[in-house]
Image (cartoon, rainbow, N blue to C red):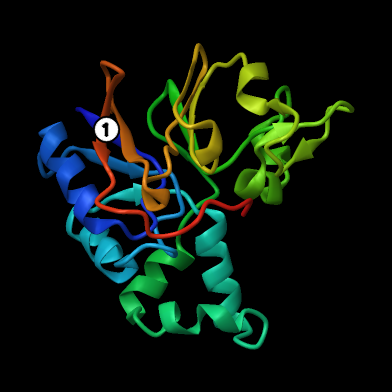
């Protein structure tokens, strides 16, 4: 069975649909998203609806986590109110059920952000899985773009697919592939088609948000 692994969509539904067409993926084949499906872009609710139509799998990103925290405490993140109001109960159920990591198959793993090399999955810090981009000089996880990209230190197995790192763009390493190429920032939407590891990209329709460290 083929699998399409897709980077951070951020509600860019038109680009997502174009990527599905480009891939030739068929209903019943596996579709996996790497988190940050929502926020910043034009149509988060439409993207979640399309995920349900395709019975897609996904991991939780930091922006899904922000939304869930808003639902529990609206006063904590008031800027998310307009986005939250576009979501239906099925959308919220989808978000609530997102795991922090996902075994795509026996060789490939999906996470949103990063992993500390050498540490078993069950001992990884959930916050690192949502926000990590780098490792600092002392070997600690960091959400910053400064430091050593964690994926360059990951030696597998498994091969890890991740997002959350738009500023570094496409990252193709022996044991890790970073697929956040900043679609919502005017870049492109990227995916990898398994088992052949074929990379696919479609350009952004426009720039929806300025790139920032979150």
- Residue at the right extreme, as displayed: 138
Q: Residue drawn 63% across and 44% down?
A: 129
Residue 105 picture quarter? top left
Q: From what the image shows, is residue 85 above or below residue 43? A: below
Q: Residue drawn 61% across and 14% down?
A: 155
Q: Could you tell me residue 203's position as x and y percent?
A: 26, 40
Q: Could you tell me residue 23's position as x and y percent?
A: 16, 33
Q: From what the image shows, is residue 108 above or below residue 7? A: above
Residue 123 picture quarter? top right
In the picture, measured across the screen, residue 78 lies left or right of residue 139, that is left
Position of the N terminus by quadrant: top left
**Label 1's element?**
strand
Q: Few, some or many C-alpha atoms within 10 Å of disc 1 (few <14, some 14-19, many ≥20)?
A: many
Q: From what the image shows, is residue 163 above or below residue 99? A: above
Who is closer to the viewer here, 132 or 188? 188
Position of the C terminus by quadrant: bottom right
In the picture, measured across the screen, residue 82 lies left or right of residue 148, that is left
Who is closer to the viewer here, 11 or 62? 11
In the picture, measured across the screen, residue 116 lies left or right of residue 56, that is right
Q: Is residue 25 visible?
A: no
Q: Could you tell me residue 179's position as x and y percent?
A: 42, 34
Q: Could you tell me residue 49's position as x and y percent?
A: 24, 66
Q: Residue drawn 46% across and 57% down?
A: 98
Q: How many marks?
A: 1
Q: Is residue 81 visible?
A: yes
Pointer 1 residue:
201
Q: Residue drawn 30% across and 63% down?
A: 48
In the picture, measured across the screen, residue 115 lies left or right of residue 30, that is right
């Amino acid at each position: 069975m083929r699998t399409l692994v897709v980077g951070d969509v951020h509600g860019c539904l038109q680009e997502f649909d174009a990527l599905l067409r480009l891939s030739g993926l068929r209903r019943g084949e596996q579709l996996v998203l790497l988190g940050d499906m929502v926020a910043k872009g034009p149509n988060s609710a439409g993207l979640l609806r399309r995920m349900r139509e395709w019975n897609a799998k996904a991991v939780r990103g930091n922006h899904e986590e922000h939304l869930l925290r808003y639902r529990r405490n609206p006063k904590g993140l008031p800027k998310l109110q307009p986005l939250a109001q576009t979501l239906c109960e099925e959308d919220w159920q989808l978000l609530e059920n997102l795991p922090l990591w996902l075994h795509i198959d026996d060789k490939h793993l999906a996470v949103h952000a990063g992993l500390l090399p050498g540490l078993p999955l069950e001992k990884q810090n959930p916050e690192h899985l949502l926000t990590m981009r780098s490792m600092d000089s002392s070997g600690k996880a960091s959400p910053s773009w400064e430091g050593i990209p964690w994926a360059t230190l990951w030696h597998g197995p498994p091969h890890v697919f991740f997002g959350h790192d738009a500023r570094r763009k496409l990252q193709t390493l022996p044991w890790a592939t970073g697929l956040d190429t900043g679609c919502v920032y005017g870049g492109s939407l990227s995916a990898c088609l398994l088992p052949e590891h074929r990379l696919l990209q479609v350009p952004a329709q426009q720039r929806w948000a300025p790139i920032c460290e979150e």
